[in-house]
Amino acid sequence: MLDIAIIGSGPAAFSAAINAQQRNKEVRILGRSIEASMLYLAEQVDNYLGMPKESGKTMMEKFLAHVLEAQIPFAESRVDQILSMGDYYVIRTGEEFIETKAIILALGMQKSRPIPGEKEMLGKGVSYCATCDGMLYRNKKVAVVGETEEGEKEANFLAEICENVTYFPRYQAENYDLHGNVTLDLRKPKAVLSDNDRTKGLLLDDGELLCDGIFFIKKTTPPDDLLFGLQMDGNYIAVDRSMRTNLPFVYAAGDCVGKPYQVSKAVGEGLVAALQAAEDLDQLKK
Ligand SMILES: Cc1cc2nc3c(=O)[nH]c(=O)nc-3n(C[C@H](O)[C@H](O)[C@H](O)COP(=O)(O)OP(=O)(O)OC[C@H]3O[C@@H](n4cnc5c(N)ncnc54)[C@H](O)[C@@H]3O)c2cc1C
């Protein structure tokens, strides 16, 4: 079992990982590729101490090199779900389940807004995770709304289980790699339709689609959907000054806890979260 699982792959996650390892904790980073970090998009960063006029891409490459040099395990992955098992947590990434005593969430900023009805119907026909909930829709009709190419994989996976799958890409691509009984639909989903507190379809900019389930495959899963019971403060994960969340042994750092969206803040909060997590774990042994 890990001591601390760090979820994310930006400056906050990498800083947390380096500092947790220095406290002799067994650490693993579970995050997307470095290109997915907000920092990677910054053409030039002038306000990070000691690295003026550096591009965000170069900074991320340097941060990653530091992590790899410290031999901290980092396999590119997307975390779909975190389950509390009482005195430890189980993290699901694709088909893999990882056990850990503590978690640092460094997920970055929420990048998309839900459409009307999406949040309200979550768990009542709306899901953010095909591998978690796909089996509930065996031989049924589903829609997949994909924000990235990852949605194509999820639609193909669901095609093996469901009667039919309609795929709504929310990005431009020359080709969509869709198999079997997946139908491509380029109309824009506007709202989730429901009847008697059960999802019945999608309202589109031109018509509607009736279906039993809707999977939204986002760039990032909302934190409180990733981990049930996590307290939010608006769009941000609620934390105290030690970066503790409301859940035991769960900490958060970086853009996901609020403004200002800045590298120095993300790195500093990653450090605070790691030190607090290490201290809390050490207290357990006493
Ligand atoms: C164009 C631009 C210019 C900027 N310029 C500056 C600047 O000049 N100075 C400055 O200080 N800051 C700047 N910033 C802000 C800075 O990039 C962010 O504050 C910083 O990247 C926040 O770090 P983070 O680790 O919190 O989040 P991020 O860097 O966004 O990293 C979060 C990572 O976690 C991953 N993730 C999320 N959910 C999951 C999941 N479920 N499973 C696996 N991985 C997941 C995300 O995909 C992402 O890769 C700029 C940002 C942009 C977009």
Image: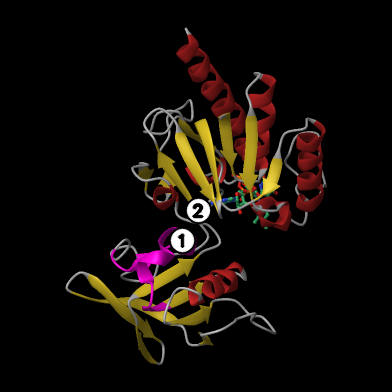
| Mark 2 nearby-residue class (10 Å; few <14, some 14–19, many ≥20) | many
- Extreme residue in the bottom direction: 206
Is residue 209 toward the left or the right of residue 178 in the image?
A: left
The disc, 1 or 2, on the residue closer to the chain's N-terminal end is 2
Tags 1 and 2 touching, CB below 8 Å: yes
Q: Secondary structure at mark 1?
A: loop
Where residue 25 appears, x then y in whole percent?
63, 23
Is 9 rendered above or below residue 248? below
Where residue 116 appears, x then y in whole percent?
33, 71
Q: Secondary structure at mark 2?
A: loop
Is residue 252 toward the left or the right of residue 12 in the image?
A: left
Q: Which residue is mark 2?
A: 80
Where residue 101 appears, x then y in whole percent?
50, 28
Q: Which residue is mark 1?
A: 129
**Numbered-mark total:** 2
On the question of residue 258 being in view, the answer is no
Q: Is mark 2 within 8 Å of ligand 1?
A: yes
